[in-house]
Image (spheres, grey):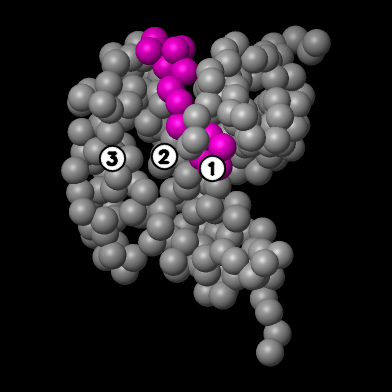
Amino acid sequence: MAAGFRPTRVYLEVGTKRVFACSLDWPGWCRSGRDEDVALASLASYAPRYAAVAAAAGIPFAESAGDELYVVEKVPGDTTTNFGAPGKVPRIDSDPLTAAEARRQAALVTAAWSVLEAVAAGAPGRLRKGPRGGGRDRDPMLEHVLGAESSYARKIGVRHRQPALDDTAAIKAMRGDIVDCLRAARAGTPQVPNGWPARYAARRIAWHVLDHAWEIEDKSEREDG
């Protein structure tokens, strides 16, 4: 092992049909597969794509980050897991945050939004469909992301109506309040009843943003005719 190399800490959310492998320290770097090995391999394969997020945040990200993944916790999944989204909070997210950790997580969430915006700006409105012709086009996908964020924000005590896609001021206000909340977080407990710890909130928000950013990238082949 090279000097200074640190394995990437990961937890697994294990459902009966799908497993999610999520980095604990890099919000949004989270991928799934049909079993634990496939999920971990998928996570490792996305390290180069996640590097763009870290770069946007101005945070060093080792080229070797995907080379050694260290599983520190496994949590049982549920119907949400099997449906295709991470839905369980690992025990380790109850650890309190330092001020530096909170700022770092908020910066990576902000960077995930920046990556999505850049991807969307370069994508066609009409996206390539899946094998059965399904899937959203670009703008409906972006609206879906905003709707999810409005819902996720309530889990940390931030309340905004879903902004319209062309209402940049409302989008900025909602995301600004989310970031302010994440920056101020210190406790490892939810700030509202039935809410999420800040670590998990940052990870879930960034995962959803990047999952769709990468989907838009992958489906951005223009169709002729």
Q: Residue furthest right?
A: 1
First in sequence: mark 2 or mark 1?
1
- Badge 1, how many Cα within 10 Å: few under 14, some, many 20+? few
Give the residue type that dot 3 points to.
Ala
> Is there any visible trace of residue 61 in the rendered image?
no
User: Residue visible at 68% across and 36% down?
Assistant: 33
Q: Which residue is mark 1?
A: 83
Tell me whether circle 2 and circle 1 mark residues in contact (CB < 8 Å).
no
User: Residue visible at 53% across and 26% down?
Assistant: 77
Give the residue type that dot 1 points to.
Phe
First in sequence: mark 3 or mark 1?
1
First in sequence: mark 2 or mark 3?
3
- Badge 2, how many Cα within 10 Å: few under 14, some, many 20+? many
Q: Report, in whole angstroms, how far the alpha carbon at label 2 lies from the one at label 3.
A: 9 Å
Give the residue type that dot 2 points to.
Ile
SS at circle 2: helix
Q: Which residue is mark 2?
A: 205
SS at circle 1: helix
Q: Position of residue 192 (x, y in %)?
A: 20, 26
Q: Which residues are magenta?
A: 81-95
Is 93 contained in the magenta span? yes
User: Which label was assigned to residue 167?
Assistant: none
User: Residue visible at 21% across and 54% down?
Assistant: 161
Tell me whether circle 3 and circle 1 mark residues in contact (CB < 8 Å).
no
Q: Position of residue 73 (x, y in %)?
A: 57, 13
Q: Which residue is mark 3?
A: 153
Image quadrant containing the N terminus: top right
Q: Position of residue 203 (x, y in %)?
A: 46, 32
> Is there any visible trace of residue 153 in the rendered image?
yes
Image quadrant containing the C terminus: bottom right
